[in-house]
Image: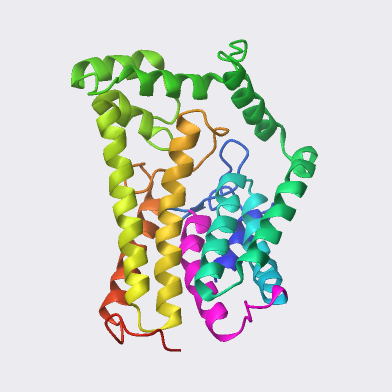
Amino acid sequence: MNLALLVFILIPFVPESIVRPRNGARRWINVGSLDLQPSELLKLTWIVAMAAWLRTTATVKRFGGVVAAIAVTAIPFLLIAMQPDLDSALLFWPGLMVMLLAAGARIRHLVIVACIATVLAPCSYPLLKKHQKDRIQAMIAHVVGDTRLDDGIGFQGNRSITLAAAGGVAGAGREEAGTLIRFNHLPEEHTDMVFSVVCCRWGLFGGLAVWALSAAYAFGAFMVGARAGTMFGRLVAVGLGTNFFLYVFVNVAMVTGSIPVGGVPLPLISHGGSAMLTTMLGFGVLLSVYMHRDAEFGPVRD
């Protein structure tokens, strides 16, 4: 069902009253008072489906089983990348590697896959869209200290770094932070760039608090996986914890200029209906895994 929705939003003749492109991207379905983003819901359904598939079908101890899991994941990856939403699509791959490791895949097979991906990644640059190339150029310019792009394609990244640094260690205070945010005109300050607002208001302590809470959730999810009585429960818990922490890591990295700016929200903090709904559903699934564990600290049973 989720994959069908991803195909649906890519159909060009669907009326704009149902699928309205925003900034050249087709990601949302209008369902009245809510704009549903199928790619956000797929984060959860993919984890559950992949956990079931790895438990019952895949032979991950063989390299062929790892390749099969990659081929299955390539389907949602391509559909989301075509929206285009390459940032969210790329996050499927590290999540898959962690789930494969938890499922018993051999480390040397995963290392081989990682090395191949690293070698082939630069070859994909010509396939990127213009705005994606611009974001890479803006990041490189920032790293080398070139300010010529700060008022153009590097504006959003430059503003986010400036605001995050303005908070210092303890934060700028409510009124001063509000003034800084208002006069710096940071695009997407309440969604993808909200971490800059957090750092501006509460400083380094606020940023570290976000990291600490995110790490605590991920650790808790891994502990739920360790105590799960079935392989399916283990993989679901590990997948949920990995996905949550990956989104936090990528969002903070792009806001601080470590990677190109993208459209990855900060879980539980960024404004957004579909992202928040999916995160809360993930909490419910994780709680269900814990409540239905078959054995406490016992061996994993299929």
Residue that appears at 55% across and 75% down: 104
Q: Is residue 239 above or below residue 121?
A: below
Q: How many marks?
A: 0
Residue 179 appears in which quarter of the rendering? top left
In the rendered image, residue 269 lying in the magenta stretch gets the answer: no
Given residues 15 and 237, the one toward you in this image is 237
- From the top left corner, tell me how far across and down residue 241 is, in percent: 40, 60
Q: Is residue 14 above or below residue 211?
A: below
Residue located farthest toward the left when viewing the structure as drawn: 174
Given residues 139 and 194, the one toward you in this image is 139
Residue located farthest toward the front when viewing the structure as drawn: 108
Residue 33 appears anywhere in the view: no
Residue 299 appears anywhere in the view: yes
Which quadrant would the N terminus be assigned to in this image?
bottom right
Magenta span covers which residues? 37-63
Residue that appears at 57% across and 62% down: 97
Dominant secondary structure of the magenta stretch? helix
- From the top left corner, tell me how far across and down residue 164 is, in percent: 37, 24
Residue that appears at 69% across and 31% down: 133
Q: Is residue 5 above or below residue 276?
A: below
Which quadrant would the C terminus be assigned to in this image?
bottom left
Residue located farthest toward the top when viewing the structure as drawn: 148
Residue that appears at 55% across and 52% down: 91
Say whether residue 202 is left or right of residue 95.
left
Say whether residue 54 is left or right of residue 289.
right
- From the top left corner, tell me how far across and down residue 100 is, in percent: 56, 69
- From the top left corner, tell me how far across and down residue 47 is, in percent: 49, 68
In the rendered image, residue 39 lying in the magenta stretch gets the answer: yes
> What's the coloring here?
rainbow
Residue 269 appears in which quarter of the rendering? top left
